[in-house]
Image: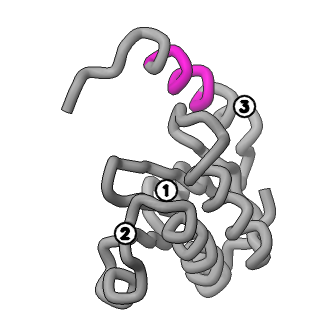
Amino acid sequence: MARPNRVTQRRVQRTRGNIRRVAGDRMRLSVFRSDRHIYAQIIDDQRGVTLAHASTLEEGLRSKLKNGATRDAAGEIGKLIAERARKAGVERVVFDRGGYRFHGRIKALAEAARQTGLQF
């Protein structure tokens, strides 16, 4: 994997800094995307524990989705992570886009999570 350039590193640091300022007692919805898949997890930073996670690598989704790198796949992950967050007792989160721009797959995941009932 290529090393991120300075602009990307600054964007990630700025995003994480804003999250720390705003988060308070809310959990963090962290997103990672690769060329082939997308991953999401709900993290409690105060305890250092992952409460829920979802990715396009899961068996139930792999057979359902043609490709893990599409907006449709990101939408499915958004719905799934919102449902799992609700089961874990989490209703409000801070969205950590991980330095990615808010468009495409990241936006599709966020919108699907919001529609399913996760607040951020």
Q: Splitting the image into 4 quarters, where does residue 66 fall? A: bottom left
- Say which label, 3 or 1, has the lower sequence index: 3
Q: Which residue is mark 1?
A: 47
Q: CA distance from mark 2 to mark 3?
A: 36 Å
Amino acid under disc 1: Arg
Q: Splitting the image into 4 quarters, where does residue 9 fall? A: top left
| Residue 84 % position (x, y) | 56, 81
Horizontal arrangement in the rendering, residue 21 relative to residue 45 (left or right): right
Q: Which residue is mark 3?
A: 21
| In the depicted structure, whether residue 63 falls above or below residue 58 | below
| Residue 30 % position (x, y) | 52, 51
Q: Residue at x 51, y 15 (%)?
A: 10
- Say which label, 2 or 3, has the lower sequence index: 3
Q: Which mark is residue 16?
A: none
Question: For this rendering, which residue is in front, 2 or 17?
Answer: 2
Q: Considering the image in quadrants, where does the N terminus appear?
A: top left
| In the depicted structure, whether residue 93 falls above or below residue 97 | below
Q: Which residue is mark 2?
A: 67
Amino acid under disc 2: Asn
Amino acid under disc 3: Arg
Q: Residue at x 62, y 77 (%)?
A: 79
Q: Residue at x 58, y 43 (%)?
A: 97
| Residue 68 % position (x, y) | 38, 66
| In the depicted structure, whether residue 101 falls above or below residue 78 | above
Q: Residues within 10 Å of mark 3 (few under 14, many from 20)?
A: few
Q: Main secondary structure of the magenta part?
A: helix
Instruction: Specify the segment rendered in magenta.
Output: 9-16
Horizontal arrangement in the rendering, residue 14 relative to residue 41 (left or right): right
Q: CA distance from mark 3 to mark 1?
A: 17 Å
Q: Residue at x 55, y 21 (%)?
A: 11
